[in-house]
Amino acid sequence: MAAAPPSGFRKPPKPLLALAALIAALPLALTNNYTYEIAILVGLNAIVCVGLNLLIGFAGQISLGHAGFFGLGAYGSAILAARYGWPALLSLPVAVAAVGLLAWAIGRPILRLTGHALAMATLGLGIIVSIVLATEDRITGGPDGMAVPAFFVQGEKAWYWIVGATLLVAVWLAQNLIDSPRGRALRALHGSEVAAGALGIDAAAHKLSAFVISALFAATAGALSAHYSGFITPAKASFLHSVELVTMVVFGGMASTFGAVVGAAVLTTLPQFLTVFKEYEMVLLGAVMMLTMIFMPRGLVPTLERALAAARRIGR
Amino acid sequence: MLLRAESVGKRFGGVAALEAVSLELEAGAVHAVIGPNGAGKTTLLNVLSGIYKPDSGFISFQDENLTGRAPHQFAQAGIGRTFQNLQVFFNMTVLENVMTGRWLHERCGLAMALLRFPALARAERACREAAAALLEMVGLARWAGSRADSIPYGALKRLEIARALAAEPRLLLLDEPAAGLNPTETREIDELIRRIAARGITVVLVEHNMKLVMGVAQHVVVLDYGRKLAEGEPAEVSRDPRVIEAYLGAEACSR
């Protein structure tokens, strides 16, 4: 009986528990409603990024329209709740499922194509969504936005736990997928699509499942954010927000779930402290993207992991 | 007949890479495809593995018509392959590369993966053991946990073979498995091909190393300018004046 060979080089020990501990301990450092609000924003963006990372980091596809799914989830649940009087607990899953169906319908024909077809299609979709949200003012309230009925809970502290729990579930699901044979198939597509095909892996089907899952995560975060803030505007679905999301994933580290969380945390928190630069947010994002590509193309977390591993080897 | 290709043609722009090539591959033998550079050998393998769709003709495997299907469907039908220009998953370990090869034998639905069904852990252990056994067979066991981009070229060649074998193909297409290898490594490949054939897997070998081809193959197909020039037993083919002319002609031109 041969000893089981070492499994892989990319599995940090029990990171999910570490994240749970962090979420549980963080309120000790959150002193007022404003800091809670930032933590909730970080959590919502992290949920989107964890899903988007499956698509960008693992399936190797770029989406420039995920804010569109975020916005559709937000408006979908808000409209069902505000205009049709649905309870939020029902409107939220229905809106999220509808966005998943839409992503499936868009992704199915597009992901059979190779190259950057998905990036262009999602770019178009994101723009269409934000235009529709801004112009269909009888349903959406137009550019001024609309009020959203509250959830069954209220207050920053309750929302912190809802978003924290949702983020944990999102990370758990994403990590499960990555650790499974399906995750290996996704990484194989990134490694060599032609070799993956020769092993019987259906590239289009796997990319489609990553795309739909990432859209579901974005819509969930969007719907939660709508009910949390009680008011939404089409800005949430804007191209700028899509680019922010992609930047978070790339900065934090592609193909690293926890990188996506860290990327969301840093790039959500930073602008809050640099409010003077508010007008230059786009410039700041561009600079972060460029510097990441030049100095740590793997992203923050994988770069740190490698540096740590190297330091340990030298220390030995 | 395991595989039948009938008057397969493939053009790239104005160039006919394959022209009316017909093949019948018997199960259980080592078949070799030889020919000068640009004769269409790799194009033929790409057609036989679904990477290129032929412009004309058809391909059937175990009496199933595969013409026009996608590469993953060729793999599902039981055709595996390696690549001349390595297509290793460099973003994985050596062991994970071979485990990926088990994909067709893993039952892993999306819900099963997302919710981490306990059955998955058992299947994963079996997959790991099967992959480790294959690494043992090709002599790469000691590199199992290394990143694929950290092992030598000759080992990568064998890694591709182990990964293809993991899918348990009935037909294995090897595209120049000995290219760039030294004589010792080439002998190892020679021996490996014999062991694969002994497992009952039919092999198609595209190779420039004539010594390897003549020693290991029972049936040789010669391509020249996209056409089938000759075929038969190795000794018979190597005496064929047309084959000699094609090779000498090609060498005379390249000098």
Image (cartoon, rainbow, N blue to C red):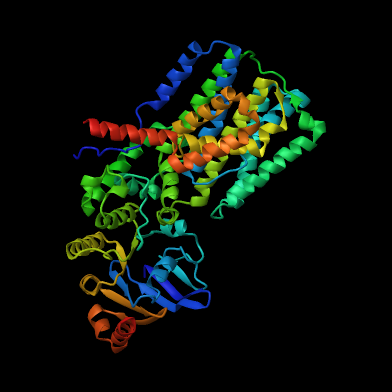
Q: Is residue B80 left or right of residue B132?
A: right
The quadrant where residue B30 appears = bottom left
Where residue A281 appears, as percent x and y from the top left, is: 61, 33
- Residue extending furthest toward the right: A138
Q: Is residue B63 visible?
A: no
Q: Please tell me whether residue A288 is drawn above or below residue A195 in the rendered image.
A: above
Quarter in which the C terminus of chain B is drawn: bottom left
Q: Nearer the viewer, residue A4 or A291?
A: A291
Residue name at image x 20 percent, y 61 percent: B185
Residue B87, x across and y down, in percent: 37, 56
Residue that appears at 49% across and 39% down: A291
In the picture, the quarter occupied by the N terminus of chain B is bottom left
How many labels sit on residues? 0
In depth, the one of A21 and A30 nearer the eye is: A30
Measured from the top left, where is residue B75 in percent x and y? 41, 57
Q: What residue do we see at 45% from left, 69% from top?
A: B59
**Depth order, front residue of A289/A195:** A289
Q: Where residue A68 sits: x, y (%)?
A: 65, 38
Q: Residue at x 24, y 86 (%)?
A: B239
Q: Residue furthest left?
A: B184
Q: Is residue A313 left or right of residue A262?
A: left
Q: Nearer the viewer, residue B210 or B9?
A: B210
Q: Residue furthest front?
A: A276
Above or below for B90 versus B175: above
In this rendering, does residue B67 appear at all? yes
In the figure, is residue A216 to the left or right of A16? right
